[in-house]
Amino acid sequence: MLYLVPTPIGNLEDITLRALRVLREVSLILAEDTRTSKKLLAHYQIETPLRSYHAHNEHAVTAALAAQMEGGADMALISDAGTPGISDPGFLLARECLRRGIRVECLPGATAFVPALVASGLPCDKFHFEGFLPHKKGRASRIEYLAGLPFTFVLYESPHRLLKCLQQLAGACGPERQACVARELTKIHEEVRTDSLNALIEYFSKPDRVRGEIVLVVEGNKGADGKDRD
Ligand code: SAM
């Protein structure tokens, strides 16, 4: 059996009792970065063996791991933070296990985009999750596409690209479109700031304000479905 187990995105208390039990009981934990995961596991006195499973080896090792699970081993996949498979490795292994008839369970738990979306105050009844945008090729056309969506959309962005991203979004969506920068969620310097793209550009133009991990939430195009969503 394969368990996909969410781990905290900052605050170490954000892990479920079931996640801790599963991580204790499986025979092997597959981790994106074993050094990062060792700290979490040490905090909870979990001594299950770890093996690395990340974007650079997932294609090479997925079949062998699935074969071990077919042979009876239960494994858990964790990423550095949040839910595996969400802008992190997980999809390939889940698909391979299902293909071989191995049970796959994903525990509910921490992920960065849900608290960002819900705390943004922007409509969250319907939304699009984009994850990371391409850095260069295809970025502008993807932003154009997103700007036309009639519902809220969510991006992951690195701090050094935040300002440029806000400027590109303002170009495609218009400077008055509402958006939210959710930074350092669950950590000491958590900040959730919702304002027009223009106002966010002005605020985050000060480099010392752009630090840490960031989720960007952008209001949908109100004109796109002909309905006012307020
Ligand atoms: N698997 C993770 C999840 O479930 O959210 C996402 C992993 S992705 C490689 C890392 C990105 O998630 C960061 O660059 C940032 O955009 C977002 N992120 C992770 N932790 C965050 C936090 N504490 N606050 C804001 N954004 C966070």
Image (tube, rainbow, N blue to C red):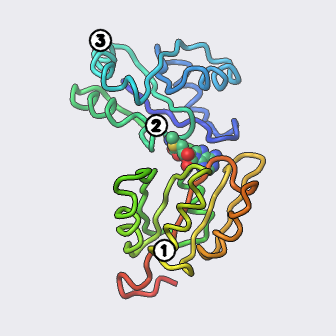
Q: What residue does disc 2 label?
A: 84
Separation of marks 3 and 2 at Cα, in angstroms: 23 Å
Above or below for 221 versus 186: below
Asked whether residue 108 is in view, the answer is: no
Across and down, in percent, residue 135 comes to 44, 50
Select label 3 or label 1 by which is in front.
Answer: 1
Closest to the observer: 128 or 170? 170
Ligand 1 contact, mark 2 (Cβ < 8 Å): yes
Select label 2 or label 1 by which is in front.
Answer: 1
Across and down, in percent, residue 114 comes to 54, 55
Asked whether residue 169 is in view, the answer is: yes
Do tag 3 and tag 2 residues touch (Cβ < 8 Å)? Answer: no
Amino acid marked by disc 1: Gly
Amino acid marked by disc 3: Gly
Image disc number at residue 71: 3
Residue 43 occupies which quadrant of the picture? top right
Q: What residue does disc 1 label?
A: 171
Across and down, in percent, residue 3 comes to 43, 29
Q: Is residue 101 left or right of residue 105?
A: left
Q: How crowded is the residue under tag 2: few (<14 C-alpha within 10 Å), some, or many (20+)? A: many
Q: Is residue 134 left or right of residue 154?
A: left
Ligand 1 contact, mark 1 (Cβ < 8 Å): no
Image disc number at residue 103: none
Going 38% across and 69% down the picture, which residue do you hit?
Answer: 144
Q: How crowded is the residue under tag 3: few (<14 C-alpha within 10 Å), some, or many (20+)? A: few
| Label 3 vs 1, first from the N-terminus | 3
Going 68% across and 18% down the picture, which residue do you hit?
Answer: 45
Above or below for 53 versus 15: above
Select label 3 or label 2 by which is in front.
Answer: 2
Number of numbered labels in the structure image: 3
Residue 149 occupies which quadrant of the picture? bottom left
